[in-house]
Amino acid sequence: MRGGAAQEATSEAAGAAGEATAEESAPVSGSAGGEAYDITLIQGVAGDEFYITMECGAQEAADAAGATLNVQGGDEFSPTAQIPILEAVIAEGPDAILIAPTDTQALQAPIQAAVDAGITVVLVDTTLDDPSVAVSAVASDNVEGGRQAAEALAELIGEEGQVLVVNVNPGISTTDQREQGFAEGIAEYPNIEYLGQEFSNNEPARAAEIVTATLAANPDLAGIFGTNLFSAEGAATGAQQAGADVSIVSFDAGPAQVEQLEAGTVQALIAQQPAEIGRQGVEQAVAALNGEATEAEITTGFTTITADNLEAEQDALYQSECG
Ligand code: T6T
């Protein structure tokens, strides 16, 4: 499964903010005038440029609020990897946790445990079956993103032929919703046959295998939608290795995906706004901690990137490190 080694990155608040320790009795003042809150961001997986870019936005907002941001992520996108990390963070007792739950059901009780421990929770990117445990959920409109992918792919293939979705795993809110939006959108084209979805387990190699096997059975396959960074990247590699003339729309805009767009292996990227998700997630956490009003749901936008607007849309691309 894809992702780097478990990571922990702590960075101190900028400016006049001090460091809160157990010994201090008076609250430490943040640069924004409030307390210097400790916030932990738990990514869906470490080493994924979507979450790295989210971290960059979260760090900016933490710095602006005089808060401390700690970032952690598992070595694979799964509840098995994420739940022990969450439990360890709960034991540390930060003021707030921003988390991208790796499963809509499996993370419900562990996140409830964080809330029961008095920790403010904000959901970022993915969500839960019952998101009301969190003070806010900040994410893309993933159903709409899937619809946009369907429209882009339909146009690329001249509105006819067979299409495939390479998804991640069932139970992930974001990618399930993208497939749902794609299926709804593609149903509007009577001459397009949707072959259905297959699951890559977030592994590019598995995604590539899915595509080569599908091409062997359906040599006229016209288009593929990869629902996230690793599924899309692997799907494009599989199509390229098979030498197939297939149009590909990829969700996300990591560096490898941009290379594939430049090489012409992929025709369109649907870039989310991960920095904005991180920024707003921290702002919601700080508002809740300050006793201010929060928004239960915040939706961020997309940019569709093709070879034609790639140069103009550089700011929409994901970062592999914070600049
Ligand atoms: O597509 C993003 C994220 O939105 C999704 O929930 C999981 O995969 C990514 O992190 C990309 O790899």
Image: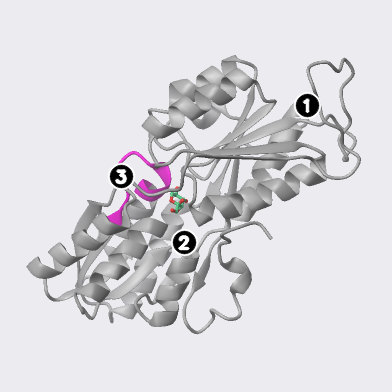
CA gap between label 1 and label 2 equals 35 Å
Q: Quadrant of residue 69?
A: top right
* Residue marked by disc 1: 291
* Residue marked by disc 2: 252
Dot 2 falls on a residue whose secondary structure is: loop
Q: Is residue 141 magenta?
A: no
Q: Which numbered disc covers residue 169?
A: 3
The stretch in magenta equals: 166-176
Q: Quadrant of residue 65?
A: top right
Q: Amino acid at mark 2?
A: Asp
Q: Is residue 172 magenta?
A: yes
Residue 181 x/y as whole percent: 37, 55
Dot 1 falls on a residue whose secondary structure is: loop
Q: Residues within 10 Å of mark 2 (few under 14, many from 20)?
A: many
**Residue that appears at 47% across and 78% down:** 306
Q: Amino acid at mark 3?
A: Asn
